[in-house]
Each structure stands twice: as C-alpha cells, then as structure tokens.
C-alpha cells in the first residue's frame, strides 16, 4: 500500500519535465507572435499559417524531451511500485517481491497516457496561440489598443494561461467539462496509474494467499464522501464477521473502481492486506501531526497548490515579457518586464508568508507546510541529474523512503551545504540538508553515501518553511 503522501508525490518529477516543455513551447509561440508582422493586416487564415510555421519546432521540443520524460516516468514507477509492494510484504509477514514483474506493464500504461497528453498538448498550444493572437488582432483593428499594447496583452495571456490539456469531455455532447494545465494533468495521470497498478498488485498477492481482509489508508482533510470509509478495514468477499468483528463489504463501501470512489479521480487513498487482530496503521479520523483540524490542513494545502500555480504563471509571464523587451526594446516593453518581475516577487513572498503563518499554528517541533521547489518550476528546472549511489546509499534511500527527487533537491537546492570532512581512514564526505531529505555524498565522486528524511527542526532552523 502506498501512503497518501507517496501518492501525492508520485507524479511530481514527470510533471516538472512537462512544465519545462510547456515553457519552451510558449517561448516559441511568443517568438512567432512577436515576429508575425503587422497585426492590423492579419486575419484568422494568416494566424493559422503563422502557427503552422512553428508547429514543427513545437513537435521537436516534445521529441527532444522524450528521453527525460521516459527516464522520470520509469524512476517514479520503479520507486513507488517497490514501496507499495514492500509494504504489502511487511503486512503479510513475508513473500517474494512482485513489483519487478509489474514495472514494464505500468511503464507501458504511463507511456500510453502520456502519448495522448502529448497530442492534446500540441492541439492546446495551437488553440492558445490562436485565441491570444486573434484577440490582439481584434483589439488593434478596433482601435482599442496600439500594436505594442496588443502584443503585450497577447503575450501575457499566452504565458498566464499556458498550454491546456482536455482532461474530461462529455462523450455524447463533445463538450469539454475539465481543462487542466499540462503539468497538472500529467501529474494526476501518472500518480493515478501508479497507485491503481500498485493496488491491483496487492489484490493479486492477496488472492494467491487467500487473504480476504484489507485496511484502507486515511489522511487529515479528506473530502466528506471519502472520510466516510477511510481508515477502516473491509472484506473483499462481501460483508463478514470474524471472531465477533464485523467487516463491511470492500467494494460497495468504498466505491473502488469508480471515478468518485477509492483510487478514483484525485484520490490519495489506497489499501493493503490486513490480518484479523493485527495492529492497525490508520485511523478513521486521523489527527494531523501539527494538531490542526483536518479541514484546516486541507484548506492550507489547497492554498499552497494555488500559490504554486500562480508562481509558475508569474515565471512564464516574466519569460514572455523579457522576450518582448528583447524583440521590441521600447520603454513600454521594459516597463512590462519590470512589472512582471515585481509580480513574481510578490507571489513568492506570498508563498513564504503562507508557509510561515501556517507553521506558526503548529505544535512545537512540527510543521504543516513546506515548499517543494519542483512544484514551482516553469522553464527553470535544474538540468543536473541525481548522482550515482553507492550500494549502501541505495539501500539507505530505499529503506528510509527517500525519493530521487528529494535527494536531487537536497543536492541542487540545499538549505545548508556543510564543508567536506575527512574521517580517520581518509574518506571524504559532505552533507547537504534539503527541505525533505538530507544527503551525505562523496564530494569527489559525487556518489550518495547515505540519506534520510530531514527533521522538522532542521527545516525550521534553515528556513525550509520560508525559502525555496
């Protein structure tokens, strides 16, 4: 079984790559818009032709990043399927690993989903460009804006709205009901595929061992319909009573397999095998470590997601404003650039304040929020890869639940990087304290020696709750 936090993080690094792809695509669209000629002499046909000139380059951006997408997807699949399977084995008291046999099928499933997302991303880029540029042409022809004013507005709209992906569409009417940004849709799709395949793997293991009971995970701030069944144990074979303990039917109680039920849309719950009388890991009404009510924690987390999106938008708008200034070189374009820079600074300060104020409410020694830099990336994703690990380092990362992205953040964006030290045997080591993990590596070979989750007191001490 994967924990709610595991499921929440499962698609983050693949989504970060797509955020980088989106930023590059928008750069190309903005360049086309800025070099497209007089707006007052263009019609929709001219705009479509203008888009077609850059479409091959957009496809090349997708193709050039395919390797990075595949790599991050495989790493996520391997890591989280292993975590899920190892938890199931512990719950059952032993067993052979199943996750290595599941990896290829899940990787293929993720690849199929991402292929559909890629097609929709290309169409989304086209529609975003045509809508922004058509509005600019209309404003200029109506005399409402000058050419430069219309260009700045179009650039802002392109960068702010980004490249959308149609996530849900009514099959009968064809009407789009949900449209998400590319990185948001990809994150959801990847984590859903991994979580659902991990659950199916658990069901296969339980079927082979004739285990009929499951425990469902729980988390603070669950939506009311999910709070009704989270943190409880159920029977896979219909309602059953064992030694006086009643176990409701799993499928009818949780809605497993439906969009609105367990492991459905935006669900972070999962389930794993349970032996009657064994200690329970989850509670029906869990208390957050901070001591804050679950509803308040949920609202704070949702506010953080909103500010993360606004920071990504502001970063894209600043990139567009800089492109416009480079192309136009006017005082007006410089003013737009400075305005975009200030907007980004305000939103980053808003994030620092949100995290600081939220954690001030928490119990001593705990926190509610901390920043995740990779959820704020928008064309500024670090290019360095996670260093190789020694065998000991790999075992420590796996045993302590440290993910590749957490280790990468510790190395690329540490809260504190200690000077290298030398032990009595002449071995060198350097500690990098990150927001979520602390990594000790060999400064000469750059191999990870050991890693472990960063303690909350160190996050507070070095400002993880304020700085990204």
Image (tube, helix red, strand yellow):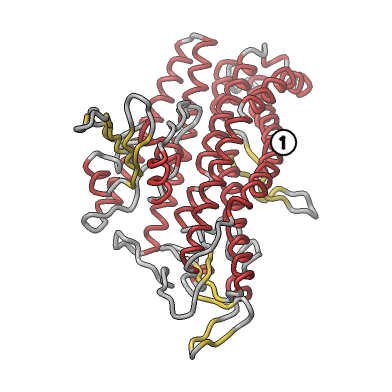
Residue 178 is situated, as x and y percent measured from the top left of the image, at 64, 49
Residue closest to the eye, 191 or 337: 191
Using the rendered view, name the quadrant where residue 438 is placed. Answer: top left
* Residue drawn at 28 percent across, 31 percent down: 430
Q: Is residue 57 above or below residue 278?
A: above
Q: Nearer the viewer, residue 315 or 110?
A: 110
Taking the spot 55% from the left edge, 46% from the top edge, the residue there is 78
Q: Residue furthest left?
A: 424
- Identify the secondary structure beneath mark 1: helix
Residue 214 position within the rendered picture, expressed as x and y whole percent measured from the top left: 54, 72
Q: Position of residue 446 (x, y in %)?
A: 37, 28
On the rendered structure, is 43 left or right of 357? right
Q: Residue at x 63, y 81 (%)?
A: 238
Front-most of 216 and 301? 216
Outermost residue toward the front in this view: 425
Residue, far top: 329
């Amino acid at each position: 079984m994967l924990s709610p936090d595991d499921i929440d993080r499962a698609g983050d690094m693949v989504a970060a790559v797509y955020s980088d792809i989106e930023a590059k695509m928008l750069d190309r669209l903005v360049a086309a818009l800025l070099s497209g000629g007089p707006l007052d002499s263009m019609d929709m046909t001219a705009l479509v032709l203008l888009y077609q000139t850059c479409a091959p380059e957009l496809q090349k951006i997708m193709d050039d990043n395919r390797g990075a997408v595949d790599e991050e997807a495989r790493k996520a699949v391997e890591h989280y399927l292993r975590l899920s399977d190892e938890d199931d084995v512990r719950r059952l008291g032993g067993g052979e690993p199943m996750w290595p046999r599941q990896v290829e099928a899940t990787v293929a499933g993720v690849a199929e989903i991402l292929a559909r997302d890629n097609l929709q991303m290309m169409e989304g880029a086209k529609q975003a460009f045509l809508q922004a540029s058509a509005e600019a042409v209309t404003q200029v022809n109506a005399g409402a804006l000058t050419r430069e004013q219309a260009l700045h507005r179009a650039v802002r709209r392109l960068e702010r709205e980004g490249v959308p992906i149609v996530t849900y569409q009514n099959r009968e009417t064809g009407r789009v009901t949900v449209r998400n940004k590319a990185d948001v849709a990809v994150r959801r799709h990847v984590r859903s595929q991994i979580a659902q395949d991990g659950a199916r793997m658990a069901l296969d293991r339980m079927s082979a061992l004739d285990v009929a009971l499951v425990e469902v995970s729980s988390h603070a701030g669950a939506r009311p319909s999910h709070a009704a069944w989270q943190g409880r144990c159920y029977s896979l074979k219909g309602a059953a009573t064992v030694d006086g303990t009643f176990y409701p039917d799993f499928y009818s109680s949780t809605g497993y397999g439906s969009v609105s039920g367990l492991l459905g849309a935006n669900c972070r719950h999962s389930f794993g095998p349970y032996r009657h009388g064994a200690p329970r890991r989850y509670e029906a009404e869990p208390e957050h470590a901070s001591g804050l009510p679950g509803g308040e924690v949920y609202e704070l987390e949702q506010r953080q997601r909103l500010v993360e999106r606004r920071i990504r938008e502001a970063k894209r708008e600043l990139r567009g404003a800089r492109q416009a200034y480079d192309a136009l070189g006017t005082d007006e374009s410089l003013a737009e650039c400075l305005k975009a820079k200030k907007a980004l600074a305000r939103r980053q300060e808003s994030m620092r304040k949100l995290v600081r104020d939220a954690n001030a409410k928490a119990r001593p020694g705990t926190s509610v929020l901390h920043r995740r830099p990779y959820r704020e990336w928008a064309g500024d994703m670090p290019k360095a890869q996670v260093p190789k690990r020694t065998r000991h380092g790999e075992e420590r990362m796996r045993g302590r639940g440290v993910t590749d992205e957490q280790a990468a953040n510790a190395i690329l964006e540490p809260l504190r990087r200690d000077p290298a030290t030398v032990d009595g045997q002449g071995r060198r080591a350097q500690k990098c304290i990150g927001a979520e993990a602390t990594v000790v590596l060999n400064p000469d070979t750059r191999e990870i020696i050991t890693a472990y989750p960063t303690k909350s007191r160190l996050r507070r001490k070095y400002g993880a709750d304020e700085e990204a």
